[in-house]
Amino acid sequence: MQALLDIHSYVRWLILAFGVIAVIRAIMGVTGKKPYSAGDAKAGLFFMIFLDIQLLIGLVLMFTSSLTKTAFGNMGAAMGDKVLRFFTVEHTLLGIIAIALVHIGRSKIKKADSDAKKQKTALIFFGLGLVFILAMIPWPGREMIGRALLPSLR
């Protein structure tokens, strides 16, 4: 179980890296009026792929973790506990919203009829997805829910 949680923690860095790359490429595309290139498409694709992998890992953790089992056992009490509420509801919901935004964005990009529309769509959907991701990460220093930037190597 701990190994899966560690993998979940490491994958977030891949998500952040490709999310930032996709958003920066979209900003450069919108401001520089550049064509939507294969590199732009790949950045968005890898952003989406790592989000999907993270979702699968997160679902396994959700249904096997003692933390979420406790929360699911009494959701009323879990809503009163900051840690249980964060990992059971807030973290999960924001993650699903981010994944949906990135998937919708990629779909709309494929249907867009101009490079300008593709770049603008990528910027909006990937940018919003990245904002939700940044909000859901249990960053160190966040009271009670903060986690280490990298899991300790055992």
Image (tube, helix red, strand yellow):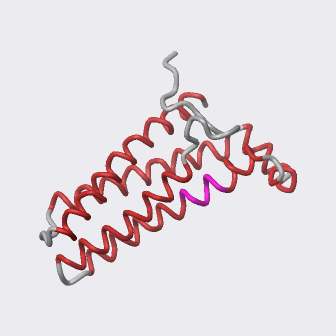
Question: 47 or 148, which is in the foreground?
Answer: 148
Question: 85 or 11, which is in the foreground?
Answer: 85
Q: Residue at x 84, y 49 (%)?
A: 73
- Considering every residue shown, the one lying at the far bottom of the view is 113
Q: Position of residue 67 (x, y in %)?
A: 73, 40
Q: Quadrant of residue 39?
A: bottom left
Q: Quadrant of residue 70?
A: top right
Q: Position of residue 91 (x, y in %)?
A: 61, 52
Q: Position of residue 149 (x, y in %)?
A: 49, 32
Q: Is residue 31 above or below residue 130?
A: below
Which corner quadrant holds the N terminus?
A: top right
> How many marks overall?
0
In the shown orientation, is residue 95 left or right of residue 82? left
The stretch of residues the image draws in magenta is: 90-95
Q: Position of residue 84 (x, y in %)?
A: 75, 46
Q: Residue at x 76, y 44 (%)?
A: 69
